[in-house]
Amino acid sequence: MAGKARTSLRDRNKEAITTEAEAEQVATTPPTATAQAAPVSPVETAAPEKLEAPAKATKQNKPPLEATEVTRLGIYLTPEQFTGAKAAYLADWINGGEANTFTRWIGEVIGTHAHRSPQERLERSMLRGRSTERTGSSRSFNVPSEAVEQLRAAIVADQSVGRWPSDSAWCAEAIDLATEDAKAKNGGTLPTPPARLPNRLTR
């Protein structure tokens, strides 16, 4: 059997170069992807909720008090009458009265006297005649205009029983009777009032 022909040196060098080139090509060829990665869906993020600020508490305004129309009324009082009136005002308050200012008490006193009949006013008459010597002074009070209207209507009604008082004398009588009634309700005595009454009484 004839032996295999011996290759030349030139052929062996060519074969070696070809083998190295093929090896380099295999090394540098990127691997073929076996499977395509599934697309990733973007994650939806919810917009942050906007928190509403708590509503500010609205300030409850108290309903305005109804304004009472007043009329300035001058009443002539002696020092004894004036002191007695202040004491009666305090006694009435102690015994559950609602008038918390002296002026308001004066207004209530006038209204009470006006609601008496002319005959009742005649029977309890405490009208004082004009003194030959001036011992008192005229004091002004801002009383409800309604009370002033009532007193003037009462003065007209008093004419039917022969009474003709002035506004000042009629009011002084109303105060004297209120002082007398307050003393009776307080057990026959009256408290000693201060020289200056507080602007408003409180319980």
Image (cartoon, rainbow, N blue to C red):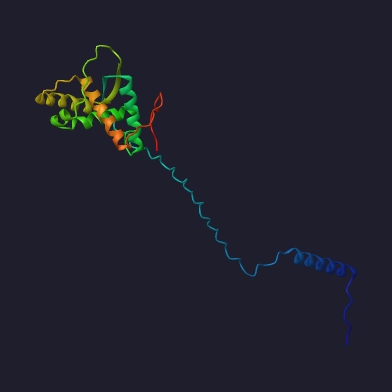
Quadrant position of the N terminus in the picture: bottom right
Q: In this view, does 3 lie to the left or right of 46?
A: right
| Residue 78 sits in quarter | top left
Relative height, residue 100 to residue 20 (above, below): above
Q: In this view, does 25 lie to the left or right of 6?
A: left
Image x and y of residue 41, in percent: 55, 61
Looking at the picture, tell me which residue is in the foreground, 90 or 15: 90
Q: Residue furthest front?
A: 188
Q: Is residue 47 left or right of residue 128?
A: right
Please give the name of the residue rendered at 15% of the width and 24% of the height, measured from the top-left corner.
Answer: 155
Looking at the picture, tell me which residue is in the foreground, 101 or 24: 101
Please give the name of the residue rendered at 34% of the width and 27% of the height, measured from the top-left corner.
Answer: 86
Please give the name of the residue rendered at 76% of the width and 65% of the height, measured from the top-left corner.
Answer: 25
Quadrant position of the C terminus in the picture: top left
| Residue 7 sits in quarter | bottom right
Relative height, residue 140 to residue 183 (above, below): above
Image x and y of residue 136, in percent: 30, 16
Relative height, residue 97 to residue 134 (above, below): below
Image x and y of residue 101, in percent: 34, 30
Looking at the picture, tell me which residue is in the foreground, 9 or 103: 103
Q: Which residue lies furthest to the bottom in this view?
A: 1
